[in-house]
Image (cartoon, grey):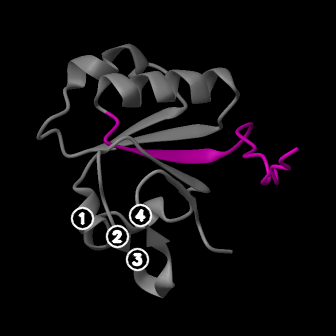
């Protein structure tokens, strides 16, 4: 029998979560699920080069949603207020970023260093 080690569960309730590439089918559905699970705030980050406002239009009136037009590769320069998000959910195909203080993001979901 193989034993699988469980990691810590991600607590969504009352979390502030950033979704990169949010203006997409996957991003908007991810936001829907996070809101349903009780996220305090969901930051929808997209540069809209491929994404569309139509994909996230149904979320715009929710007070827990904040739409941020920014490029993930230039995030340290333009959006310092986003660093206190507890979780970053990447709906992009591939990305690798390093932020001030040594925090690193390499696609998927990564937690901010404490």
- Image mark for residue 99: 3
- Of callouts 1 and 3, which one flags the residue occurring earlier in the amino acid sequence? 1
Q: Position of residue 18 (x, y in %)?
A: 48, 47
The residue identified by callout 1 is 73
Task: Label 3: state its secondary structure.
Answer: loop
- Of callouts 1 and 2, which one flags the residue occurring earlier in the amino acid sequence? 1
* Label 1 Cα crowd, 10 Å radius (few <14 / some 14-19 / many 20+): some
The residue identified by callout 4 is 106
110 left or right of 1 in image = left
- Of callouts 1 and 4, which one flags the residue occurring earlier in the amino acid sequence? 1
106 left or right of 56 in image = right
The residue identified by callout 2 is 97
Q: CA distance from mark 1 to mark 3?
A: 10 Å
* Label 3 Cα crowd, 10 Å radius (few <14 / some 14-19 / many 20+): some
83 left or right of 111 in image = left
Task: Label 1: state its secondary structure.
Answer: helix
Task: Label 4: state its secondary structure.
Answer: loop
From which residue to which does the magenta span run? Answer: 1-22
Q: Residue at x 50, y 77 (%)?
A: 103
């Amino acid at each position: 029998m193989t034993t699988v080690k469980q990691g810590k569960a991600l607590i969504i309730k009352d979390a502030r979560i950033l979704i990169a590439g949010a203006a997409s089918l996957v991003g908007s559905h991810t936001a829907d699920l996070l809101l349903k699970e009780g996220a305090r705030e969901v930051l929808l980050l997209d540069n809209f080069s491929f994404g569309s406002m139509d994909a996230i239009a149904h979320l715009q009136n929710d007070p827990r949603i904040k739409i941020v037009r920014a490029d993930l590769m230039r995030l340290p320069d333009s959006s310092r207020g986003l660093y206190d998000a507890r979780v970053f959910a990447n709906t992009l195909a591939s990305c690798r970023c390093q932020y001030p203080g040594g925090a690193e993001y390499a696609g998927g979901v990564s937690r901010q260093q404490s």
